[in-house]
Amino acid sequence: MDENKKFRRYVAIVVIVLTLGAVFVIVSGALGEDSWASVMAALLLVVMALVAVKVARRWSREMKSGFPRDDERSVAIKMRAGYLAFFISLYFMFGIGFVFAILEDTEATSVPTSEWAMIFVAVMGLIYGGVNAYLNRKGVPE
Amino acid sequence: MKTRIKEFRARYGFTQDDLARKIGVRRETILFIENGKYVPSLKLAHAVAKVLKTSMDELFIFEKD
């Protein structure tokens, strides 16, 4: 598949995901769902939109430059960042879950599963972005 | 790992951009390989050596700690 076709497909997927997300936020807000969850979902949506625009602009610039978008170094960085993001967020969730388990025992507050999932995705995304940026500057360790 | 890519590039008058285009990688990849911050695969190392008309032994210097 040529790069232009891939780019158009990416834009279409982003538009569908953001539209569905916006519908979810609007409906959950209108139904008077837990406001914290709606605000959190809206925030995630804004972050996703900003990242999508940044990726699209960079992709478009790279297509014009004539260099390949991915080569073995960039793939190695993505793999390393994905691996680290997955395991660090697992440890993070385990740690936070442990803290909340203790809080529940003391009849303090607990976090609903839907918000839990959003926190997990946000933490994983942040770690992925951070590690990716770091490795892009410092290089991939041997 | 040290490399002599810069030296060989200069010999043939290639910029990092030129070399990257000839091999089909990103310019940053050439920069990182030159600075010893990325160890290329055998396939990529071979491609670089071929474009610079030399051998991998000449181009990449592995030093023991």
Image: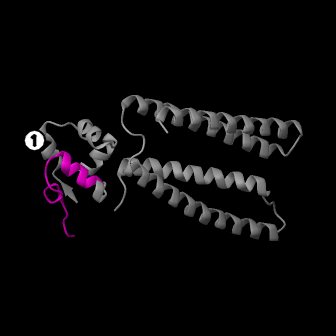
Let me know if residue B35 appears in the view.
no
Q: What's the magenta region?
A: B44-65
Q: Is residue A22 left or right of residue B49?
A: right
Q: Is residue A30 left or right of residue A8?
A: right
**Local secondary structure at mark 1:** helix
Quadrant of res A112: bottom right
Q: Position of residue B49 (x, y in %)?
A: 19, 51
Q: Amino acid at mark 1?
A: Arg
Residue sitting farthest toward the front? A1
Let me know if residue B42 appears in the view.
yes
Q: Position of residue A28 (x, y in %)?
A: 84, 41
Residue A112 forms part of the magenta stretch = no
Q: How many marks?
A: 1
Q: Nearer the viewer, residue A30 or B31?
A: B31
Q: Position of residue B10 (x, y in %)?
A: 13, 40
Q: Is residue A29 left or right of residue A73?
A: right
- Rendered position, B17 above or below A96: above
Residue B49 forms part of the magenta stretch = yes
Q: Nearer the viewer, residue A14 or A24?
A: A14
Determine the residue positioned at 15% across, 51% down: B4
Q: Position of residue A87 (x, y in %)?
A: 56, 64
Instruction: Give the labeled residue for mark 1.
Output: B11
Q: Residues within 10 Å of mark 1 (few under 14, many from 20)?
A: few
Determine the residue positioned at 54% across, 53% down: A127
User: What is the chain identity of the residue bearing mark 1?
Assistant: B
Q: Nearer the viewer, residue A38 or A103?
A: A38
Residue sitting farthest toward the right? A31
